[in-house]
Amino acid sequence: MTAETHLLYKIAKAYYEDGLTQSQIGKRFGLSRIKVSRLLHQARQTGVVQITIVAPAESHAELERALEAAFGLDEVIVAAAPQARRQDSVALMGQAAAVYLARCIEDGDVLDLSWGTTLLATVDAVAPQSLPGVRVVQMLGGLGKLEAEAAGGDLALRLATAFGAKMRLLWSPSVVSSRLVRDALLQDDNIAETLALAARADIALVGIGAPTPNSVVLQSGMLTVEELDELQARGAVGDVALRFFDAQGQAVDHPINERIIGLELAQIQRIPRVIGVAGGPDKFDVIRGALRGHLINVLITDEDMAHALLADLPHLAVEVHARQAVLQDGGSLVNL
């Protein structure tokens, strides 16, 4: 063992096992803190220090990490459900989203909110906090004829109440009758200021919808069957806050865009943290399109969807399955 390797070993022991700070180590061994930092890095590079990270039991950490890497996401959270409780996946996704939101939100943040059943489940699961500096902003107008508890205004009110936060509602329908009506409404100070605030948000919590006959947008009267058919003919596979996109996550050009009161897709993409909460057997193309287009940077989904997305990436699927096998055999994963 060389003198340098001996020193690396002693410094690594002091830092990782004895819990000394880099300044304390420097004082003990007569080194500057910068040199201690460099030597600790060298210890890892040369193998004197080998870090082992053991995934928790029944964890989907490898699956999450593979999807994060494949789609350039900040984080993926898989809300796992026992086989007998698949029907509870929406509630489980909502619980996971509520925990994530509580972790990342800070007092003073502006939080945008769209609408939908998964966001309803999220708001239902949010634990009360005291965040008086947070502003919860409705990023899209109301649902239309069938206002419901899953509508943006109601969700924003409930979430703001849970956080003890301020609230900013968008007092308009989400889809109006013409471009002229939209332009007139955008001249209203309250609507214009609310959308400007929404565009400056720190976090957006959104559902990811599918343009199907059973969708809320059709049942609520926001879109007609003819408009839905036109959107699908132009390649639309899904929407975020009523902004429709194709299989590659690119905005779909359609006259409906000129009648929407809400943030545009490009504005949503500029929000630093966009959390998409979605799952279910009919959402594969929708979620994959949103991921391909980088419309969200955090995905919270169900176990089946996560596996389906991974299966669409065969080279990653093989690697993840191998790593999961190691964990199931009681092993650990090194240098993940």
Image: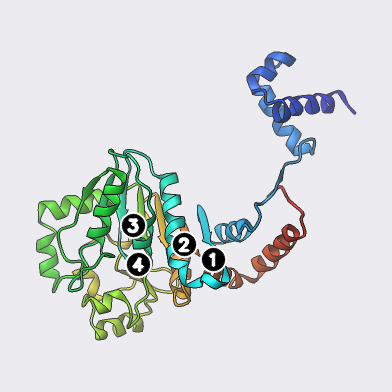
For badge 1, the amino acid type reads: Ala
- Observer-side mark, 4 or 1, equals 1
Where residue 117 is drawn, which disc sits there?
A: 4
Disc 4 secondary structure class: helix
Rounded to the nearest angstrom, the CA distance separating label 4 from label 3 is: 20 Å
Q: Does the CB distance between marks 4 and 2 fall below 8 Å?
A: no
Q: Quadrant of residue 51?
A: top right
- Observer-side mark, 2 or 3, equals 2
For badge 2, the amino acid type reads: Leu
Of labels 1 and 2, earlier in sequence is 1
Identify which residue is drawn at 33% across, 81% down.
Answer: 214
For badge 4, the amino acid type reads: Thr
Q: Position of residue 177 (x, y in %)?
A: 13, 74
Residue assigned mark 3? 268
Where residue 158 is drawn, which disc sits there?
A: none
Identify which residue is drawn at 22% across, 68% down.
Answer: 143
Rounded to the nearest angstrom, the CA distance separating label 4 from label 2 is: 12 Å
Rounded to the nearest angstrom, the CA distance separating label 2 from label 3 is: 25 Å
Residue assigned mark 2? 92
Given residues 86 and 332, the one toward you in this image is 86
For badge 3, the amino acid type reads: Ile
- Observer-side mark, 1 or 3, equals 1
Q: Locate residue 193 relative to residue 94 in the image: left or right.
A: left
Of labels 1 and 3, earlier in sequence is 1
Is residue 134 at least partly visible in the picture?
Answer: yes
Q: Position of residue 280 (x, y in %)?
A: 46, 73
Of labels 2 and 3, earlier in sequence is 2
Of labels 4 and 1, earlier in sequence is 1
